[in-house]
Image (tube, grey):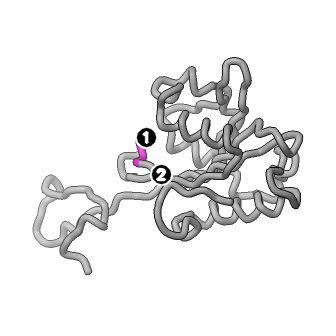
């Protein structure tokens, strides 16, 4: 069962790549409840172009920590740094008590996939929102030891400045804030 952090049909909010990876993950799950695919069940050749939007976190036991094993090339463009090999505890603002830690910890503890949307914070100023699909993986098909994350980013739309405003008068804002539209 996919747990969502928002109202409505969760799959309608996912990007095409997130939806494809979710379907692949479900197909890779052994046919019983509480059983997860292993990292070995996820074939890179089957994932092709989708892998550039994927990160994989290893779960470390004592103390509990989450370490980036892999960060796809497209995903890396949206981060301030390449965090490959680093743990969440080592990254400022991502350790215990942070939003990302809480999300990862929830998947680790419950074994439930999760989809959520959060404000985007990163080097690309023209993007406003990130959505991530978190999928548990288990080497023994029972004990979650990795989490696969599939991310998508939504761009901010600019207003039409053809009505006489100069470039210094242009404001960047999400389309849904435009009360004149529709």
**Residue indicated by mark 1:** 122
Callout 2: few (<14), some (14-19), or many (20+) C-alpha neighbours within 10 Å? some
Provide residue 44's location: percent of width, then percent of height. Answer: 81, 51
Task: Between residue 152 and residue 22, name the one nearer to us.
Answer: 22
Quadrant where the image shows the C terminus:
bottom left
Q: Residue at x 65, y 43 (%)?
A: 107
Q: Residue at x 67, y 18 (%)?
A: 63
Q: Earlier in the sequence, mark 2 or mark 1?
A: 1
Provide residue 58's location: percent of width, then percent of height. Answer: 72, 33
Mark 2: which secondary structure?
Answer: strand
Residue at the limit of the structure toward the bottom, as seen here: 182
Q: Main secondary structure of the magenta part?
A: loop
Q: Residue at x 19, y 75 (%)?
A: 180
Mark 1: which secondary structure?
Answer: loop
Task: Between residue 3 and residue 79, name the one nearer to us.
Answer: 3
Q: Does 175 sit above or below residue 77? A: below
Provide residue 117's location: percent of width, then percent of height. Answer: 48, 53
**How many marks overall?**
2
Q: Point out the stretch of residues depicted in magenta.
A: 119-123
Q: Is 72 left, or right, of 48 in this rendering? A: left
- Dividing the picture into quadrants, the one containing residue 9 is bottom right
**Residue indicated by mark 2:** 130
* Disc 2 to disc 1: CB gap under 8 Å: yes
């Amino acid at each position: 069962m996919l747990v969502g952090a928002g109202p409505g049909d969760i799959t309608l909010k996912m990007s095409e790549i997130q939806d494809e990876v979710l379907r692949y993950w479900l197909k890779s799950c052994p046919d019983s409840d509480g059983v997860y695919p292993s990292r070995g069940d996820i074939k890179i050749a089957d994932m092709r172009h989708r892998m550039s939007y994927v990160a994989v976190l290893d779960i470390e036991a004592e103390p509990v920590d989450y370490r980036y094993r892999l960060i796809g090339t497209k995903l890396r463009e949206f981060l301030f740094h390449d965090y490959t090999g680093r743990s969440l505890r080592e990254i400022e603002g991502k350790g215990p008590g942070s939003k990302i830690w809480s999300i990862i910890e929830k998947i680790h503890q419950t074994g439930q996939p999760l989809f959520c949307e959060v404000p985007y914070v990163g080097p690309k100023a023209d993007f406003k929102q990130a959505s991530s699909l978190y999928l548990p993986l288990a080497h023994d098909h029972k004990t979650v030891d990795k989490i696969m994350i599939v991310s998508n980013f939504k761009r901010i739309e600019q207003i039409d400045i053809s009505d006489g405003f100069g470039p210094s008068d242009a404001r960047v804002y999400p389309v849904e804030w435009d009360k004149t539209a529709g």
